[in-house]
Amino acid sequence: MKSIVEKQKSQSLRERVFGLYVIIDPDLTGGRNPMEIARQTLAGGANIIQLRSKTQPDYMMLSLAKEIATLCSAYGALFIVNDRVDIAAISQADGVHLGLEDLSVSEARTILKHNQIVGCSSHSLEEAHAAKLSLPDYIAVGAMYPTTAKKQPIVGGPPLLRKIKSSINIPLVAIGGITQKNVGPVVRAGADAICVISAIGLAADPQNETEKLRDSIRLAGGKTK
């Protein structure tokens, strides 16, 4: 059972799921150091950083996770680890993000500290409602637009997000093909946070691109850092 203090800490982190959410993938940095991308992203105003690594050995991913966790703490940003509940726990990340084929939310919570949060993915209205039953702290919805950053067969777009927003009252993170030019309809459809990967990781100037995307979110009516 969570103590009252632990529940408050977890709730507090959930309330910080808003603004620009950037996934740092060592394979999508244009050959640059992922720590440098993370620094520029945070300096540009990102509110959440997620580390996603599908190819690094465990020891390298853990080392990078610990570095990014420290950096995010210094900037007052949330740090989330993709898939790897063990690395999220050891690196003292703020939480973990789970895909449809990963551990369940309840299984992840047996490993994480009580004040760490858990997010999960959905690609349809049905998946979002199924995810809600597992009591995650946020649900990611995508893809908003076609993307090459990851395999994404379903592109529900802002209309899907709007439907989910009308029936689910926890933070929603929109993901998939989002850029400065097309973020407006996503924000207006109800996204609490806007998640991007290659739009920042492959940008010539990640900090400047982060600032522009953050400003576009704000201009569309979204909450930013």
Image (cartoon, rainbow, N blue to C red):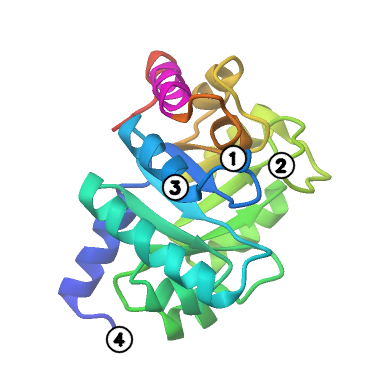
Q: Position of residue 197 (x, y in %)?
A: 59, 40
Dominant secondary structure, magenta: helix
Q: From this viewpoint, is residue 166 visible?
A: no
Question: What whole-number distance in Å separates the C-alpha atoms at marks 3 and 4?
Answer: 23 Å
Q: Position of residue 43 (x, y in %)?
A: 31, 34
**Which kind of residue does numbered mark 2 sit on?**
Ala
> Is 126 placed left or right of 13 in the picture?
right
Residue at 16% across / 72% down in the picture?
Answer: 5
Q: Is residue 177 above or below residue 51?
A: above
Work out whether mark 3 precedes mark 4 in sequence or the reverse, and give the earlier one.
Answer: 4
Work out whether mark 2 precedes mark 3 in sequence or the reverse, and give the earlier one.
Answer: 2
Q: Which residue is mark 3?
A: 169
**Dot 2 lies on which element?**
loop
Question: What whole-number distance in Å separates the C-alpha atoms at marks 4 and 1?
Answer: 36 Å
Q: Which residue is mark 2?
A: 149
- Closer to the eye: label 3 or 4: 4
> Does the CB distance between marks 2 and 3 fall below 8 Å?
no
**Dot 3 lies on which element?**
loop
Work out whether mark 4 precedes mark 1 in sequence or the reverse, and give the earlier one.
Answer: 4
Q: Which residue is mark 1?
A: 197
Count residues near mark 3 (Cα–Cα under 10 Å), then give few for <14, some for 14-19, many for 20+: few
**Which kind of residue does numbered mark 4 sit on?**
Met
Residue at 44% across / 71% down in the picture?
Answer: 88
Judging depth in this view, the residue of 32 and 84 nearest the camera is: 32
Q: Which residue is mark 4?
A: 1
- Closer to the eye: label 4 or 1: 1
Work out whether mark 2 precedes mark 1 in sequence or the reverse, and give the earlier one.
Answer: 2
Work out whether mark 3 precedes mark 1 in sequence or the reverse, and give the earlier one.
Answer: 3
**Which kind of residue does numbered mark 1 sit on?**
Ile
